[in-house]
Amino acid sequence: MGVDSGVVTGCTDGIGKAYAFELAKRHMNIVLISRNEEKLQRMALEIESKWSVRTKIITADFSRGQAITYHIESELKGIPVGILVNNVGKQYTYPMYLGEVSEQELWDIININIGATTLMTKMMLPQMTQRKKGAIINVSSSSELQPLPLMTVYAATKVFIKSFSEALRVEYQGEGITVQHLAPFFINTKMNAFSHRLQENSFLVPDAETYAASAINTLGRVNRSTGYWAHGIQYFFTMIPPMWIRTYIGAIMNQIFRKDYLYNIKTQVSFL
């Protein structure tokens, strides 16, 4: 992989998968990092057959924390990385009160959403600064815009991503590195499968392919974005009310999504 490669974490579904395809369309070699080796192999074959670029797969479970980064760093040795897409993330199974979330799930959310982005970025910085070029794309969420009851810890990790990206950009502003922060609203992906309302493509809820095709075109043009024009409109109107109102609205929305999930589970149990 002598030419610059794109590294995408959390790449076997949703935004990450769509981003990997978009980079491959632009003739970049792709390093695919995720925890499901079977999905990684299928993806690599599809990418290579469609776009005649080279791929490398790295099986990694970011919930293992710092230990997994040594494995990834060893696998990436000697590969010039032009773009890092920090996409891997973990969401609540469905909107829950903090006391209902297991300790393991909370630790996984923190390790994956915060730890993976931080350590993957640190890993890539030396070679990017040495070559005076590179781009780091940190995929956050509109949940960063206010405290989000019933997804309390998830939303808090996204606030970290926003702050981390803004500070990192200033730290490395003279090194030729682009740091982009993306904060999409709802996208039709498995991560939002807790509600049927978010599993249908619409004007405001695009599929991952539509989103990635739009978001990737903003790289090098804007440092922070929702990544999708309709989400930009949502952002404008979302930020008009004061934070306490946004927080209250978020709580109401999550109560609705919670009821959707619990009703669906109840229906499935009744059917069985």
Image (cartoon, grey):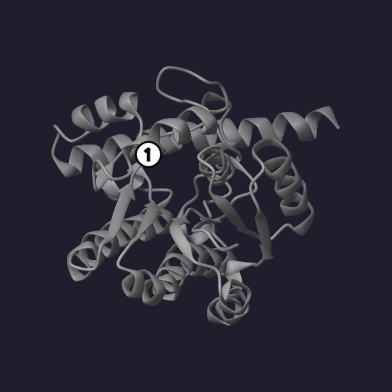
Q: Residue furthest right?
A: 272
- As helix, strand or loop, the secondary structure at mark 1 comes to loop
Q: In which quadrant of the rendered image does the C terminus lie? A: top right
Q: Residue at x 54, y 59 (%)?
A: 101
| Along the line of sight, the residue nearer the viewer: 164 or 51 | 51
Q: Residue at x 33, y 23 (%)?
A: 230
| Along the line of sight, the residue nearer the viewer: 98 or 238 | 238
> Horizontal and vertical percent for residue 49?
73, 39
Q: Residue at x 41, y 17 (%)?
A: 203
> Horizontal and vertical percent for residue 136?
37, 58
| Along the line of sight, the residue nearer the viewer: 28 or 109 | 28
Q: Is residue 209 left or right of residue 45?
A: left
Q: Is residue 9 left or right of residue 34?
A: left
Q: Is residue 86 depicted above or below 191 in this figure?
A: below
Q: Is residue 139 depicted above or below 237 in this figure?
A: below
Q: Residue at x 27, y 39 (%)?
A: 248
Q: How crowded is the residue under tag 1: few (<14 C-alpha within 10 Å), some, or many (20+)? A: many
Q: Quadrant of residue 186?
A: top left
Q: Quadrant of residue 162?
A: bottom left
Q: Which residue is mark 1?
A: 184
Q: In which quadrant of the rendered image does the N terminus lie? A: bottom right
> Horizontal and vertical percent for residue 3?
52, 59
Given the image, on which type of amino acid does mark 1 rest? Pro
Question: How many numbered circles does the render carry?
Answer: 1
> Horizontal and vertical percent for residue 170?
17, 65
